[in-house]
Amino acid sequence: MNDEKQSSVLSEILSNGHQKIFDENWPMWLGGLLIGIMSVITFAWARPWGVAGGLRNWGDWFFSLVGIYHYKPESPLISTSSILTLGLLWGAFGSSLLSKQFAIRKAPPLELLKGIVGGILMGIGSAMAGGCNVGGFFTATSALSASGLAMMAGLLAGAYLGLRYLYWELEHLPSGTSGGTAVSKKEKEFDWLKIEPYIGAVVFLAAIVCAWIYNKNAYTRVGGLLLCGIAFGFIIQRTRFCFVRGFREPFMTGESDVPRAIAIAIIVSVLGFAALKWSGLRGENVYVPQAFWFGGLVGGVIFGIGMVVAGGCGSGSVWRAGEGHIKLMLAVIFFALSTSLFKAWINSSAGLISLMGYRVFLPNFLTYKWSLILVIAIMLVFYMFAAWNEETEKFVAEL
Amino acid sequence: MVEGISPDETLDCRGLSCPMPLLKVKKALKKLKPGQILEVLGTDPGSKNDIPDYTKKQGDEFLGMEDESGHTRYLIKKGG
């Protein structure tokens, strides 16, 4: 075989690979499986995955800069929470470029307003529940915290209420359109789509360089977390993994793909977390927030309404912002500001802190074995409920 | 595949993101008679999976989609 032929075969393999990975969205269940695995890897490396903590760090940092807070929060470049969320944004941005899906996506005024209001509600909800749908529900449940299950109930109720609002809005408010003018000046315009994959590759290379710089400066742990966050962003953008859909679809279309993916993610993740905690490799209280039951449940309801109105949860808003949606960029900004303020307010009063509830680590009451069985059983029931509802549409709300 | 089909109604969802396009499609399809055709213009990348999946699930016929300048055009035939 001559060299030329070899290189053409190689380029064909590369282009096929690119098409498989970047042209088609991956199946939802695969997203659940990979998120479960990444969640365990992240915890084993340094700490569990969270999103709202990073947003809060950015909010704290902003309020400190403008002089409202009189202390200096941890630098966003060093804070592990901040780095994980930055990685999520970074990974989603790079992945949407590689898939030619990045574009600055404008939205009509009502939609922008919904991004702001949804972001504020999510900020309040996650301050109460000790995290967003990731830290407060997904990771907390994996960490065998009772507050995660309380938040799950709240999220379901909140998603239903949020959907009722969307139905009302559809009948009573004109939603408007962004129109088609943005791209109509076609002539001579530079075709960004063609070079997006190359920019995407540079974005990922830059991340590796950053991780290397962290490593050189004795911040290997932080650099590794940046790569973990980027892996989450990449997986989530490619699968369009969306916790909102997991809680909204049972009431809206009845579809059960996402509830199944969430159940898979948590079952994988809880097994890994239990192994890390049971064996004593990680502290038992890690990601067991003081939020059972009031903070988790009520925070979950408020967060649930917010995420449906905004059209993205903690992770979902961040990755869609990375894909260029202006509405979700606003949601992320207002999420960060409101969660910072609300958390500062809760922390300023011992009464409010105790109102949020207790720190309940399930194995202290049920042993590890039964806690695991309980969490896995709840996930299976959640999936079976969704699959049954998909056939019967018993819980699907009529328009 | 979708060229040359003239729709009975057009729904402009440009600039809307998930789940608004799907909800609007759901509402618009309700008003159509079986056999009538709905054209949807959208910009949300998620719609490329959501609209075909949803219409098939509801027993409507998804006729196809194509990318035009700045948006994607979807055609759906209401089922009986």
Image: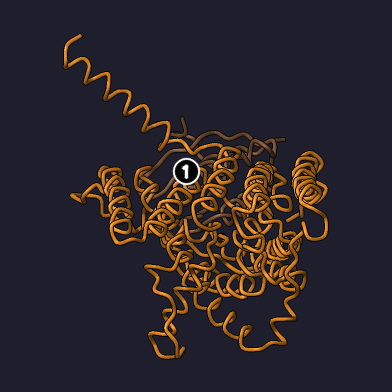
The residue nearer to you, when weighing B45 against B56, is: B45
Chain letter, brown? B
Residue A316 is situated, as x and y percent measured from the top left of the image, at 53, 57
Total residue callouts: 1
Name the element at disc 1: helix
Counting from the top left corner in percent of width and height, residue A187 is at: 21, 49
Q: Amino acid at mark 1?
A: Arg
Q: Nearer the viewer, residue A117 or A231?
A: A231
- The residue sitting at the top extreme is A1
Q: Is residue B66 above or below residue B11?
A: above
In which quarter of the view is residue A70 placed?
Answer: bottom left
> What chain is tagged by disc 1?
A
Q: Residue at x 28, y 48 (%)?
A: A205
Q: Is residue A55 above or below residue A350?
A: above
Residue at which label 1 appears = A238
Q: Determine which quarter of the picture holds residue A247.
A: bottom right
**Type of colouring:** by chain
- In the rendered image, the residue lying farthest to the front is A280
Q: Report whether residue B1 is seen.
A: yes
> Which chain: orange?
A
Q: Is residue A201 above or below residue A171?
A: above
